[in-house]
Each structure stands twice: as structure tokens, then as C-alpha cells.
Image (cartoon, rainbow, N blue to C red):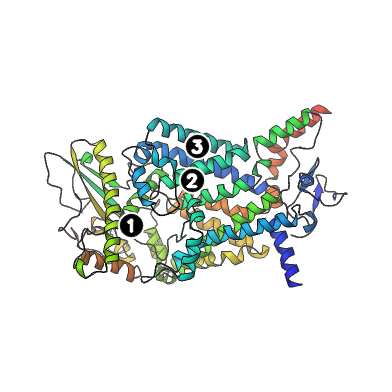
Amino acid sequence: MNTKRIKNVSGRQWSNGPPRSESDLHAPQGVVASSGVSSAGIAWSGRARFIASVLIGLHLLAVAAEPLRFFSRSPENFAAADTALLRRALGPYVDAMYLSHGYFFFAPNPGPAHLIECQLNPESDSTSIESANISSVALDKSQWKIFPDRKDQWPRLLYHRHFMLSEFYHTLFAPTELENIAEIDPRVVEQWREDRRIYESLQDCIKQNLINKHPSHNVVLKRIQHELPNPRTVLVDRWKLTDPRLYNELLEGPVKEVAKEVKSQLSTPQVIPEPMVPGIIQTENRGNR
Amino acid sequence: MIGRDFLKGWNIFWFEPRAATTLAMIRIATGAMLAYIHLVWCMRLEDFFGPNAFTTGAFSQSLHRGDYVWSYLWFTDSIPLLWAHQIVAIVLSILMSIGFFTRFVIPMIWFMTLMVCHRMTGLLFGLDQIVMMVTMYLIVARSGDEFSVDRYIASHESNASGGVQKSCQSAYLSTSNTIATRFIQIHLCIIYLFGGLGKMRGETWWDGSAVWLSAVSYEYQSFDLTWIGKFPVLMALAAHITLFWETFYVCLVWPKVTRYWVLAIAVGVHAGIGLFLGMITFGWMMIVTNAVFIEPETMRRWLGFLKSNLWTSGAVTSESARN
């Protein structure tokens, strides 16, 4: 790394010694230079290097700020005090430069996928089609859409955008109502109201997009969780990965049920789920409008 | 003494000038990927950016209330304007890839893609993070000094004026290249470190079932991988190699003795993710980004056949003509 290895194309050593300045380093004719020049080849002045070093340090802190905050969070705390302080201090830079990523790819465990089932019902027929059993329901294709859908969304990157949308929709979910709202910390209630507002906004956007393409239709959105089967289910019982029994509609509320669902997702370290009972998981208290 | 050694090491690490060979290759691949990303946005432009988009500009703006994210794309849903934006972005991406007006084009395409990223919150994933990261650091670098139209033009202008100072055979050393290279390297190490630490928290990466869970994730799957369930040892081994490789990448990628082993595993892991989990674009970009650990000199050697055939042919021809 630290050896002087500047040679011309015929392999001779550079007779005039290593370059001293940036302009020198834009080497003269026929010079092929490796990355391994000696420290004498450093062109920047001490002051320039000092300023650059400070900026480099700050930038690297900004790169690490969000994953540190993300990693140090717990059910009780938004983040550890130090990482929260770092993230807050560098917030403008981290946000503006698109550095706000936790980098938790497939971590801590690969989990089930989340889909959006969109039912498009003619306005004359206000009854929604009651089923989460996706594959077994014979619906007119124009009346039913799913995000993501490989047949409709190609190439793969386009499909992935729709997949991320459905996961995002699931991530933003907030239940329709809170039970015993009077007994809950007002800050939690306020946060829930805001979360619910954002969730409904996204819901409205997706619905409007579909209504725009299918006028005179009502749209009903359902969150579907595609469970991951265990090896026995697939290899011995011969379930396909698209088996309808692996698709479950998720609850929109009330909060007690949702909390139970969320808690089980968080506390159970992604145990490979046992096969679900075929059919609808819940039919009451749908939050979709 | 220790302080002086540290300072010397720091200076060499960050400020010792290096050639742009590796960064130029990364620039070509990243520019092409950016063009593809913008092209795919265009395929459903109205669904993504229009007045009835899945996430409208107003919704996207409301998500970022209180933070420091901003995008001019929040304020327009005019389809002709958005088409114009995307076409310009695709053209700039291609120019970046071929290295034409590189120093101007890379900041422009980075900024335009940044605006798209801030607009499309919720529809992005690892690919966007990696492409943006690499493009951001290429702004600093002089990646257009090699394998570029800029270089070709410069060498021809130089030859035409009777000089040979900018021969295609020469390498430009620059501190900017070193800083950009180090940034990408360290940023990549941070990504892997937290990715690995995150997996360390999960039981399935330890009991080996994570590979099965990934294999049976139908929404990701490209090929039927359920056969792997018949080989629990293989599944566990793959999970453990991934876990340890990702976590200790930050340590093992620097020493030359382990570097190419670590990079070989990176190629295997990301090619596997690309082929089997349907994320070809993400897998490819991760492999491209890992190339930043290949020294410019080594990259030149590997690209020797290009050097002797395509790359230097222009210079050889023009110099022969002068003689």
C-alpha cells in the first residue's frame, strides 16, 4: 500500500520521483500509476486535510446515526439517549441527504409478506365480497386486484415497487378505534389519532387511484398476510406456497384484537407458523370504507 | 509517536491520490442502473406521480412533516412535466454511464433522483439506498477520468493540439478518488455491520430456518427453492455463513489475505438474492458496490483485454497517425 509504484507503460520507475501536487498527479504521457504511491504523493495542504477530515468525520457520524438509533430502540424507548441525541443533532443532514436508513435487510428474521386485496364492486351492488380466500373465489378479474401481482406488474422492479407499497400500507396501519380510550395516556391517544389519519390518507390515495381507473365502482381494501409455511407443510403435506390457507386477512380493529396480533408478531420471534384454518380470520369491525 | 503514526496512516488512508479505474467501472454500472430505475418509474408514471397516484404529493409531504425532507415533486402532478422530468433523468443517467460532462451530470442526476426518493416514500427499498449512496460519493470522485467520453475527447483534443499529455494510456491520480472510494467502502461496511447485527438478534438466523423462510417467501421467490428444505445442514450452513460474513465484513474486507474471500462470498450471497429472491437489480448493485474494494491497479489488470483492444485503440491510432 505504502510502496512507491509509479511506473510508465514499459514498466520503468518514474525517474523524477513521486508527484508532489494534484496537477503533477495528472500524470504525464504514458504514465500508468497504481493507487499505491507513498505519502509524499499527498497533494493537499495540511489545512485542507484538516478541514476535509472534520467534514469526513461528521459525514460518517451522519451515516451511522440512523442505524444506531434504529438499533437502540426498544418497546419502552424511541432510542437510547445518546443515539437519539446524535440523530437529532444531525437530523437535517441525515434527512436531506437520504441517509435515514436502518439497514435491517431480512432482519431480525424473514417474516411473512403483506398484500393489499382490492375489491372493486359496481356502485349498484354495495355488498362487498366476503372472503379472504383469494385463490378460491371466482371473481371477474376487473373486480379484483392484488398488490403485488407478478402477472400485472412487470418487470420485476415494477413489481417490487408495488410490493413495497403493500408492505408500507401494512406498516402504517393504525386500528379503527381504541378501547377504553379514557384510561389511556393522552399522548398515546394523540399519536394513535395521527397514525390513523396517515393510514386513512394512504387508504384514500390507493382507493382514488383505483376508482379513477374503474369509475362507478366502490373500492374495498383488505390487508392480507401471506404466512410462511414450515418444511413439513410443504414437503410432507404438499401445500403449495399459494395455498389459500396461507393467506389471512388482518384485522382493522378493535385495538384489543389488533394489539394481540401485533404483540404476537413482535414477541414471538417469527416461529414458523402452523397451517392456518382455512377461511376468514375475522369478519367484524372492518375499518375500510 | 503513536499520534504521528496515526496521523500518517490517516493521511495515507484518506488523502493518498489514486486512479479512477475502479470508480469509473462503478460509475458505468450505476449510471445504467439509474437509467433503468427512472425508466421503470415511467412505466406507470400516473400511478406513481400523477394526480391519482398511490401516494400523492400531498400525502408524501404530510409524511415528512417535522423532518428535513423536501422534494419539488410534491408540488406538481402535471403528467407532461413529470414525463419531461423523467426523460431528463434518463438522459442524464445515460450520460453518467458513458461519462459525458461527468462532473456536471453526476450531481444533477443525484439531485433529481434524490427528489424522486423524497417524493416516493414507501415505494423504495434497498436498491434505491445503494444507488443513491454510490451516486452521492461519485460526485466527489473524478470518475470521468477513465472509461469515459470526457476522457476520449480530452485525449483527442490533446493529440490534435500536438500534445500527448492526456493520452488514453495514462492514469489520473486524484485525492478526490481516494475520498470517494473510502466513503463507499466505509458506508458499505456500516450497512453490512448493522445488517449483520440485526440478524444476530433473530433466532432464525441461528437455528438455520431463516434460509427456509426466505425460500418460501412467495412474493420474493423467482424459482422454486423449497427443495432446500430436504437439506437442513445446507440451510443452516447458508444461514450461518450469511450471519458471520455480514457481521464481520467490516473487519475481514480490509486485510488483503481475507479480502477476496469476503468479496467472493458477497458475490455469491448477492447473486443468490438476485437470482432466487427476485431482486436482481439490488443484488447486482451490491456486487457492483463491493467492487470498490478492488484496487485500481488490480482492476486495470483484470480489464487488460479491454485495455489492449478497445480502451487504448483510439490513442494508439491517433498517435500512429501523428507519427
Alpha carbon of mark 1 to alpha carbon of mark 2: how far? 23 Å
Q: Amino acid at mark 3?
A: Ala
Seen at 46% across and 43% down, the residue is B115
Element class at badge 1? helix
Name the residue tied to disc 3: B89
The chain that hosts pointer 3 is B
Q: Is residue A225 visible?
A: no
Specify few, some or many for label 3: CA neighbours under 10 Å numbering under 14, 14-19, or 20 or more.
many
Q: Quadrant of residue B215?
A: bottom left
Seen at 65% across and 53% down, the residue is B179
Same chain for the residues at labels 1 and 3, yes or no? no
Name the residue tied to disc 1: A171
Q: Amino acid at mark 1?
A: Thr
Seen at 36% across and 57% down, the residue is B217
Alpha carbon of mark 1 to alpha carbon of mark 3: how far? 30 Å
Q: Quadrant of residue A111?
A: bottom left
Same chain for the residues at labels 2 and 3, yes or no? yes
- Residue A281's spot in the image, x, y percent? 19, 60
Mark 3 and mark 2 in contact (Cβ < 8 Å)? no
The chain that hosts pointer 1 is A
- Residue B114's spot in the image, x, y percent? 49, 45
Alpha carbon of mark 2 to alpha carbon of mark 3: how far? 11 Å
Looking at the picture, does residue B112 appear above or below residue B272?
above
Name the residue tied to disc 2: B114
Residue A238 or A153: which is nearer the viewer? A153
Residue B17 or A177: which is nearer the viewer? A177
Choose mark 1 or mark 2, whichever is in front: 2
Specify few, some or many for label 2: CA neighbours under 10 Å numbering under 14, 14-19, or 20 or more.
many
The chain that hosts pointer 2 is B
Q: Quadrant of residue A139?
A: top left
Element class at badge 3? helix
